[in-house]
Amino acid sequence: MEATDHLHQHEYHDEHEHDHRRETAQAWLKTAILLALGAYFAYNIVTGNLANYINQRFAWLSYVAVVLFLVLGAASAWALVRNRGQAACACDDHDHEHITWRALAVVAIPLVLGTLIPSRPLGSAAINGDISVNAAVSANFTAFNSDPLKWNVLDWLRAFNGAEGAASFAGKQADVVGFVYREATFPAGSFMVARFTVSCCVADASAIGLPVLWEAAGDFPQDTWVRVQGTFEVGEFRGDTVPVLRAASVERVEQPEHPYLYP
């Protein structure tokens, strides 16, 4: 009988040690993930990559994330060091431990995707024909009272929507920056100068653009960032009568620091 009890105690001890080693390994891995997430958000802030993901109005959330993850990671690391590299026993709290792991796995997804996928703004590959030449006029839109030569693509589309017809823009000059977008159905000597609008993050991004006429349009490959200066005339695009920008000059430029436009 004593031998049987001793055997059961030995098996229980081995199982307990196995669980404790597993929990310790999990605790170290959790700590590494928390610290890596903090470093990842900090890296995106420092390098400017944050602008590729979210509206700048919400950039403060990333600063909060840096502090939160680094503090949690540091606290977890300190607890492990204080316990000589071992996790505190959570033998009576396994369900809580499993829930925590599932939640942490979800939180770690941005780290995995951000590491595997290079950071760059959306381009023509994300459009796939879904690009608009219309934009809603917001209540706080003040571009109508500013210099039209300072309007961006979004400003011009809002102005078009707020006007009675395309003819009212004939002869107006524009100076806009965007990336080259074209489809196989576009006539020769034409392209769209395009931008993405982002309300919150890239998940709600929408492509908008202005039709451009330029004889040497083929000199600029898809996704090339360009500055287009020219004059609007009434033309037809995708079967609709719209203002078309006849370019006087098209020059290659660097991608803007903030590639998205914010409604």
Image (cartoon, grey):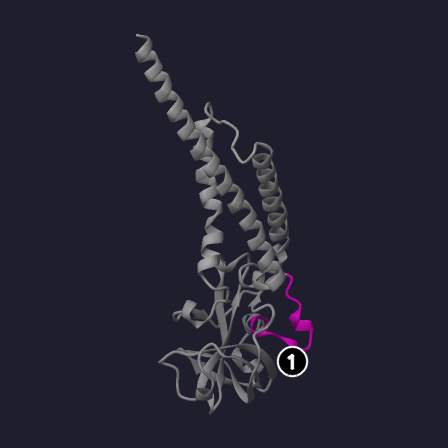
Instruction: Locate residue 159, reporting x and y percent.
Output: 58, 72
Of residues 4 and 86, the one drawn nearer to the viewer in this rendering: 4
Amino acid on which the number 1 mark rests in the picture: Leu
Q: Quadrant of residue 257?
A: bottom right
Side of 60 where 110 appears, left or right = left
**Res. 263 visible in picture:** no
Of residues 93 and 2, the one drawn nearer to the viewer in this rendering: 2
Q: Which residue is at the far front?
A: 3
Instruction: Locate residue 92, reporting x and y percent.
Output: 46, 23
Side of 161 where 186 appears, left or right = left
Instruction: Locate residue 82, reporting x and y percent.
Output: 60, 33
Q: Which residue carries the number 1 mark?
A: 149
Which segment did they paint magenta? 140-155
How many numbered tags mark residues here?
A: 1
- Tag 1, which secondary structure? helix
Residue density around tag 1, few if under 14, some if 14–19, many if 20 or more, within 10 Å: few
Picture layout, residue 11 above or below residue 112: above
Picture layout, residue 109 above or below residue 169: above
- In the rendered view of the protein, which quadrant contains the C terminus? bottom right
Picture layout, residue 147 above or below residue 258: below
Of residues 124 and 184, the one drawn nearer to the viewer in this rendering: 124
**Res. 2 visible in picture:** yes
Of residues 146 and 175, the one drawn nearer to the viewer in this rendering: 175
Q: Which residue is at the far top?
A: 1
Instruction: Locate residue 235, reporting x and y percent.
Output: 47, 84
Query: Which residue shows up at 58% across the image and 37% down it?
Result: 81
- In the rendered view of the protein, which quadrant contains the N terminus? top left
